[in-house]
Amino acid sequence: MSGSSASSTASGLGAGVLVMVVGLGGWMLLGPDDPQAAYADLPPAAPERLLVPSLDIDADVVPVALSADAVLDPPQDGELVGWWDGSARPGDRSGQTVITGHTVHTGGGAMDPIVDVEAGRVVDLRTDEGTMRYRVTHSEVVEREDLASRAEDIFGQDRTAGRLVLVTCTNWDGSVYEDNIVVYAKPLGSPAPDA
């Protein structure tokens, strides 16, 4: 999907976009750096693999789409993560690349370690055109109800600069996940071959 098509699709959804993450126990609502490395442009392409070296996250990425009622379901397989195919692709100049996946309180979810991510850490998204590297700027824990009201800001495609958004559930209370964690990262470009 082109960046402009993604923008049109997301803009039409407005604040009604809901993102759901499955954690064990039920549905949950979403809505080492090398600063000297040289970066180059990367042609836009769908992500195929998510890597967060500082957290040992290495997961295949599959496209996921919004349902008719504007719900985005992550892949059923907890070891996979989903890229919202209505969001920006790595290499797009605008919009937000949205990746979601499972957190499983007993372990085995691709996104389990994401709660420990620190600002400044590197996140890589591999595509068939190469790898787009991002640097984490910040993360926040968002109450499930608040995520729906902030969906346009968190997931909307009208940003003029590209951004990566990782979303999963957090704060297991013994029966359900109470909140979501949202991680934001800015694109650095494709890493130099020796990076």
Image (cartoon, grey):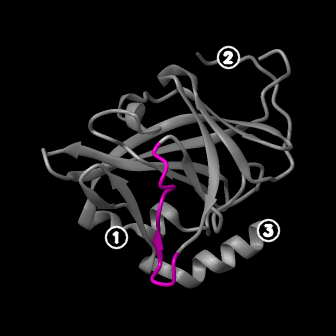
Q: Amino acid at mark 3?
A: Ser
- Real-space CA distance between mark 3 and mark 2, rounded to the nearest whole angstrom: 31 Å
Q: Residue at x 61, y 31 (%)?
A: 51
Q: Which residue is mark 1?
A: 148
Q: Residue at x 63, y 63 (%)?
A: 87
- Real-space CA distance between mark 1 and mark 3, rounded to the nearest whole angstrom: 26 Å
Q: Which residue is mark 2?
A: 34
Q: Determine whether, in the image, residue 182 is placed left or right of residue 95.
A: left
User: Is 4 situated above or below 185?
Assistant: below
Q: Amino acid at mark 2?
A: Asp
Q: Residues within 10 Å of mark 2 (few under 14, many from 20)?
A: few
Looking at the image, is mark 1 or mark 3 earlier in the sequence?
A: 3
Residue range corresponding to the magenta coloring:
67-78
Helix, strand or loop at label 2? It is loop
- Real-space CA distance between mark 1 and mark 2, rounded to the nearest whole angstrom: 36 Å
The quarter of the displayed image where residue 132 is located? top right
Q: Which residue is mark 3?
A: 2
Of the residues tagged 1 and 2, which is closer to the observer?
A: 1
Depth order, front residue of 12/188: 12
Label total for image: 3
Helix, strand or loop at label 3? It is loop
Looking at the image, is mark 3 or mark 2 earlier in the sequence?
A: 3
Tell me whether circle 1 and circle 3 mark residues in contact (CB < 8 Å): no
Q: Residues within 10 Å of mark 3 (few under 14, many from 20)?
A: some
Q: Residues within 10 Å of mark 1 (few under 14, many from 20)?
A: some
